[in-house]
């Protein structure tokens, strides 16, 4: 599997349960970048990684589906 950049950090089960009583949004965490350009670059690279992964799956699946029709 591939790792992609996300704006929001992945919460744990405990922090997810704590959010039920977090009315002030104290537990909100974001993945931070030093500059806007770095954040944009990470997000764009993540987007293209996902597109590449989807293309890989489609190219792998297409011949199998064509043979079954």
Image (spheres, rainbow, N blue to C red):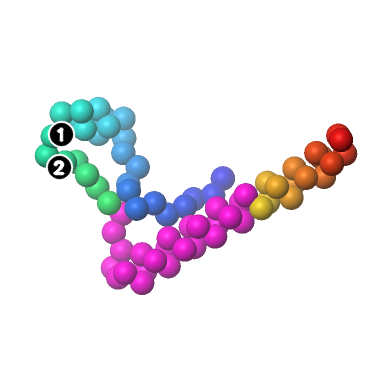
Instruction: Tell me where residue 38 sits by quadrant.
Output: bottom left
Which stretch appears magenta?
Answer: 31-54
Q: Secondary structure at mark 1?
A: loop
From the top left corner, tell me how far across and down residue 52 is, in percent. 61, 56
Q: Judge left or right: residue 62 versus residue 25.
A: right
Q: Is residue 17 above or below residue 3?
A: above
How dense is the environment of label 2, judged by Cα within 10 Å: few (below 14), some, or many (20 and up)? Answer: few
Report if residue 10 lies within the magenta region. no
From the top left corner, tell me how far across and down residue 58 is, in percent. 70, 47
Residue at left offset 28%, top offset 68%: 34
Residue of label 1: 22
Q: Is residue 5 above or below residue 61?
A: below
Q: Judge left or right: residue 11 versus residue 4.
A: left
Q: Are the residues flagged by discs 1 and 2 in contact, CB closer than 8 Å? A: yes
Residue at left offset 11%, top offset 39%: 24
How dense is the environment of label 1, judged by Cα within 10 Å: few (below 14), some, or many (20 and up)? Answer: few
Q: CA distance from mark 1 to mark 2?
A: 6 Å
Task: Work out which residue is located at the far left of the displayed protein and give it.
Answer: 24
Q: Is residue 40 above or below residue 55?
A: below
The image shows a total of numbered marks equal to: 2
Q: Secondary structure at mark 2?
A: loop
From the top left corner, tell me how far across and down residue 53 is, in percent. 61, 51
Report if residue 44 lies within the magenta region. yes
- Quarter of the figure that contains the C terminus: top right
Residue of label 2: 26
Q: Is residue 33 above or below residue 25?
A: below
Q: Judge left or right: residue 47 versus residue 51.
A: left
From the top left corner, tell me how far across and down residue 41 is, in percent. 43, 67
């Amino acid at each position: 599997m591939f790792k992609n950049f996300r704006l929001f950090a992945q919460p744990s089960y405990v922090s997810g349960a704590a959010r039920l009583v977090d009315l002030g949004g104290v537990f909100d965490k974001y993945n931070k970048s030093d500059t806007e350009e770095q954040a944009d670059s990470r997000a764009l690279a993540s987007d293209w990684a996902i597109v590449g992964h989807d293309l890989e799956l489609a190219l792998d699946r297409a011949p199998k589906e064509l043979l079954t029709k």
